[in-house]
Image (cartoon, grey):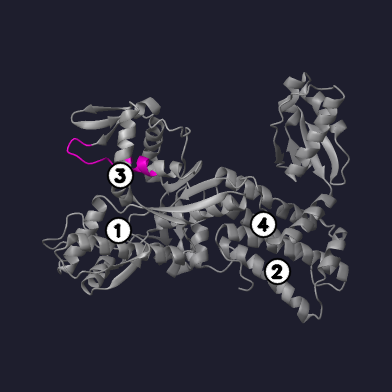
Amino acid sequence: MKDFLRDQLLQALAALQRNGSVPADIPTGFVIERTRSKEHGDFAANAALLMSKPAGMKPRDLAQALVGALPASAQVAKVEIAGPGFINFFLSPAAYRAELRQILELDQAYGRNASGENRKVQIEFVSANPTGPLHVGHGRGAAVGDCLARLLQATGWDVTREFYYNDAGQQIANLALSVQARARGIVPDQDGWPADGYRGDYITEVARAYMAGETVHADGQDVTGAKDTDDLEAIRRFAVAALRREQDLDLRAFGVEFDVYYLESSLYTEGKVEETVAQLVAAGHTYEQDGALWLRTTEFGDDKDRVMRKAQGGYTYFLPDIAYHVTKWQRGFGRVINEQGADHHSTVMRVRAGLQALDMGIPKGWPEYVLHQMVTVMRGDEEVKLSKRAGSYVTVRDLIDEVGRDATRWFLAARKADSQLTFDIDLARTRNRENPVYYVQYTHARICRVRDRFAEQGWSWNRDNGLASLDRLDTVYDQDMMVAIARFPEVVDLAARNLEPHLVATYLTELAAAFHTWYDNSHILVEDADLRDARFALADAVRTVVANGLDLLGVSAPDSM
């Protein structure tokens, strides 16, 4: 609808330009927004305010001229000028009936657009260290990241999902030492237990599998336990493979799949880190001080310069991050989005500064970041902090086992990512309107039940007759329902542009409430066939929008509940 109204205004502007009322070189970056009050119509445009100065006219005078030049349309009931020069459009019922027809015609494609123009975008998310089961923070990253991928695909982007495995560094060394200790029969707090060892039951499971000579399949290869407690490298390889397989199984249970798994270790084995250091030195943005190699990140907006190579040897953690992002750029991703925990906030500036220092033509502000805040899990009035298997945190699997995949995904994605999230297990298990995911899914199931009741009454829904009888939808409840479903494409577009999938969840919750109000005041299974078919056409359009919206969140749309 916004596109239609924009085209109407552009036609009016072209008419004014042809008759010489306004110059030909006027910017047309105006916006059209839904109004907050029905008194101001359905949509408002700031075109006259934006173009008044280059047009050499007062805003209200230009608004009057634009309104006078608008082409006639059956979809616009009237147009008014408000305030300093806003143009308010009041749509006719015919406009919303046309949108309803489009919903039923496009079906699963409704709400999608091609604004991404098939450009490449890579979304990196989860990227957990393979040192244990995925915790709820990883789950939030998985939910938000996967929803972002779905939204960008729905708006025409060529999306690649990527998982960066941090399979190098001290945490992996601690993992190997922990499994080694368990394999030797040492338990936490006993002499010989590593100072920073991992304590969960999963360490015992990995150690048992290693000593039993089991084979695990991960990342396209098999790794077999060597049964040797002295071979720390063999233990490391087996433990990493075992936990990577477990994380993959958790993600599959969560409905999340990746196109690429990238290993941090490959940055070293393929010389990517050394190449990056050499490039930074050659670009003249480094210096040596106190035996360490520093990068002048202050030249690119950082608050202080950063050490790249420590005096005692070894690289700081942000250098492989820079090298990794160089590979993203070299792989042709002009747009990259990193979905990570808020604890990565301090690395954003450093990574961007390092990429700028390479002088490779990487634009400022690349990559983009979506950072999520922590999750607090509650049962009743008590916070749930521990998982016996993980040892020190609640896992994604814990939540899925407690409340199911749909509720877990919904609750982890339904709030803005940078907001603290309280996951209420009791609410997520509730089967009533207080539980938003149940309420939305019930909307879909309720409409499917009405469809089944047609046959029970000896009727069948005549879709064509329903579309031909849409003028029977003449109540205020009908109009409000049609307005509500017509908002869906705008919500999808805005959520994708702002990288805010929670907007879809918010919209679906509001849509469900609107549907139940309409349903309670609009009997569908009536004797009048024209009215019956028209009302179910509207109900089926709601079902389509609900299903499409839930799909963007990775949540199922059940036919019965």
The amino acid pointed to by label 2 is: Ile
Residue at 58% from the left image edge and 47% from the top image edge: 496
Question: Which callout, 1 or 2, points to the residue nearer the camera?
Answer: 1
Residue occupied by mark 3: 271
**The label number, if any, that marks residue 131 in the structure image:** 1
Looking at the rendering, in which quadrant would you find the C terminus?
A: bottom right
Image point (62%, 45%), residue name: 117
Packing grade of label 3 (10 A; few <14, some 14-19, many >=20) is few
Q: Nearer the viewer, mark 3 or mark 2?
A: 3
Farthest residue to the top: give it: 56
Q: Is residue 343 above or below residue 515?
A: above
> Residue 27: where, in percent of width, then height?
71, 27
Identify the residue under disc 2. 447
For mark 4, give the secondary structure: helix
* Residue for badge 4: 511
The disc, 4 or 3, on the residue closer to the chain's N-terminal end is 3
Magenta residues, start to end: 310-324
Q: Looking at the picture, tell me which residue is in the foreground, 116 or 182.
A: 116
Of callouts 4 and 2, the N-terminal one: 2
Separation of marks 4 and 2 at Cα, in angstroms: 13 Å
> In front of the other: label 1 or label 4?
1
Task: Pick whichever of labels 3 and 2 is earlier in the sequence.
Answer: 3
Amino acid bearing label 4: Leu
Q: Earlier in the sequence, mark 1 or mark 4?
A: 1
